[in-house]
């Protein structure tokens, strides 16, 4: 059954750069608020509890959370690509089946991950060489987070679905609401009631629950083909296969990124609590770039997916070219800002001079190379939009993950320093971007785009 379109689909018909920015800004602002309420946890803990608690919330625990959430976000991208393609093709029946299958997968996956995460939290933290003085708080934070992983999965999936059909505004609204809720709860639990890491964890738990409720309510009240019915949540075999075909490689990519970050975190933990805390703070500043980069990745995947579904292949190459240009400009501006304001930015999180010194050195070594990652994000997002995920996954596994692990192992034997570990980022970004450029041009030539 086809969807009657009373209005023009601007993603497949409108001016590309204008529609891309209109779609991009709500995503990046939404990601900003998502990072903000994570950052508020770090700021409040750093100032009102101490650097040990700061390392507990933002060190090994944060890397483990990033690994799990990153894998599911990759899986959810499979649903968003499939829905975008069906929406572009105006296939109403398939859109509805994809929506309810995606929700069923979110519920099932969250139950499994929650149980495993709560049980295995101490083992995972021990494997990462988490310092003994922060182990208890790290276990507490991690277990409470995993107890609420259902809300994280539901919100991420619901937001991906809305963005797949061109609605990037409502996920933004929900993130703003939950960000301020998290700030209020952090202030109450940590500053007023002195609950420490427990208070931060509970604030995050409750905020995420509210965000999941909002996005689910939006889909249940939606008009037209994108309406969620709780009684219809189930797996549809053919749709599920399509979602997993695209989602699993993206999830594996995300996991491998996170695993290499976990390995780096474990290596840096060996340099002591000051280094772990510095890396934790840098991670919050580093997230400014990643929220912009991921927003462009989501945008181009949606645009390419809908145009591919609508069989408008002529627009795909132009969308990719425009996205690269805009992302380059924005990334360059971010590099300049982060380098110029590095010391004041670190002082927002901590007053410890040694943590600030180590952290600012890390920032100077990594941020200038953000420009190279633009190719990876945009080209992989474009390829994902047309359903090409296997070769990009292999490129990522070899160019980023395998090479980074080999670099770290070799660097620690030759020169066991923080700088040697940190330099694994630029060297792997450069190699992977070259591989993506070569494969992208081969692919578009083969498709005659």
Image (spheres, rainbow, N blue to C red):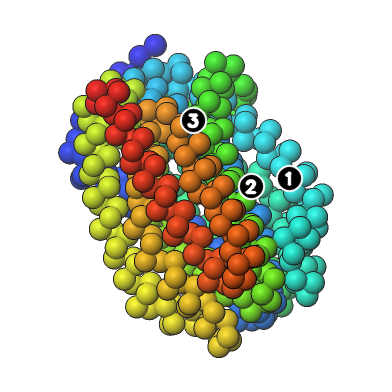
* Pointer 3 or 1: first along the chain: 1
Which residue is at a point 26% across and 27% down the rendered structure image? 445
Residue 95 in sight in this render: yes
Left or right: 165 with respect to 403?
A: left
Please name whichever residue, 381 or 211, is drawn nearer the observer in this view of the structure: 381
Mark 2 residue element:
helix
* Pointer 2 or 1: first along the chain: 2
Picture quadrant of residue 342: bottom left
Mark 3 residue element:
helix
Between the C-alphas of marks 2 and 1, the distance is 10 Å
Q: Which residue is mark 3?
A: 390
Name the disc covering residue 82, or none.
none
Name the disc covering residue 114, or none.
1
Q: Find residue 55 and report its horizontal and vertical position in percent.
A: 66, 71
Left or right: 62 with respect to 20?
A: right
Q: Badges 2 and 3: C-beta atoms under 8 Å apart? A: no
Please name whichever residue, 201 or 272, is drawn nearer the observer in this view of the structure: 272
Q: Badges 3 and 1: C-beta atoms under 8 Å apart? A: no
Q: Which residue is mark 2?
A: 68
Please name whichever residue, 237 or 151, is drawn nearer the observer in this view of the structure: 237
Left or right: 112 with respect to 400?
A: right
Which residue is at a point 56% across and 47% down the rendered structure image? 402
Q: Find residue 307 and report its horizontal and vertical position in percent.
A: 29, 28
Is residue 353 shown above or below 193? Answer: below
Q: Find residue 217 and report its horizontal and vertical position in percent.
A: 53, 39
Between the C-alphas of marks 3 and 1, the distance is 28 Å
Quadrant of the drawing holding the N terminus: top left
């Amino acid at each position: 059954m086809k969807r009657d379109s009373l209005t023009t689909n601007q993603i497949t018909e409108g001016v590309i750069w204008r529609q891309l920015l209109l779609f991009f800004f709500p995503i990046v602002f939404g990601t900003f608020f998502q990072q903000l309420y994570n950052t508020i946890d770090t700021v409040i803990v750093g100032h009102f509890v101490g650097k040990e608690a700061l390392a507990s919330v933002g060190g090994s625990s944060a890397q483990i959370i990033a690994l799990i959430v990153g894998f599911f976000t990759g899986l959810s991208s499979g649903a968003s690509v499939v829905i975008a393609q069906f929406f572009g093709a105006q296939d109403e029946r398939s859109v509805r089946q994809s929506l309810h299958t995606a929700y069923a997968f979110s519920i099932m996956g969250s139950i499994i991950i929650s149980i495993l995460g709560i049980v295995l939290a101490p083992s995972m933290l021990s494997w990462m060489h988490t310092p003994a003085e922060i182990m208890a708080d790290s276990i507490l934070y991690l277990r409470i987070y995993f107890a609420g992983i259902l809300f994280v999965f539901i919100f991420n999936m619901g937001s991906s679905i809305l963005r797949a059909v061109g609605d990037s505004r409502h996920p933004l609204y929900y993130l703003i609401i939950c960000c301020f809720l998290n700030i209020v709860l952090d202030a109450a639990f940590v500053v007023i009631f002195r609950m420490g890491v427990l208070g931060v964890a509970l604030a995050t738990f409750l905020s995420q629950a509210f965000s999941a409720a909002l996005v689910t309510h939006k889909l249940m009240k939606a008009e037209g083909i994108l309406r969620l019915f709780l009684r219809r949540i189930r797996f549809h075999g053919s749709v599920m296969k399509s979602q997993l075909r695209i989602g699993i490689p993206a999830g594996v990519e995300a996991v491998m990124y996170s695993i290499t970050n976990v390995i780096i975190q474990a290596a840096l933990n060996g340099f002591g609590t000051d280094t772990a805390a510095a890396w934790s703070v840098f991670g919050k500043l580093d997230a400014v770039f990643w929220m912009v980069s991921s927003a462009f990745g989501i945008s181009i995947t949606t645009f390419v997916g809908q145009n591919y579904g609508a069989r408008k292949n002529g627009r795909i190459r132009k969308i990719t070219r425009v996205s690269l240009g805009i992302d380059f400009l924005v990334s360059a501006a971010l590099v300049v800002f982060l380098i110029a304001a590095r010391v004041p930015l670190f002082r927002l999180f901590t007053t410890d001079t040694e943590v600030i010194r180590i952290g600012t050195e890390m920032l100077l070594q990594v941020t200038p190379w953000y420009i190279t990652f633009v190719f990876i994000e945009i080209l992989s997002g474009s390829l994902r939009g047309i359903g090409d995920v296997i070769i990009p996954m292999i490129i990522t596994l070899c160019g980023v993950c395998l090479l980074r692990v080999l670099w770290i192992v070799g660097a620690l034997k030759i020169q066991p320093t923080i700088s040697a570990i940190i330099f694994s980022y630029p060297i792997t970004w450069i190699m992977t971007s070259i591989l993506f450029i070569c494969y992208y041009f081969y692919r578009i030539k083969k498709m005659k785009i």
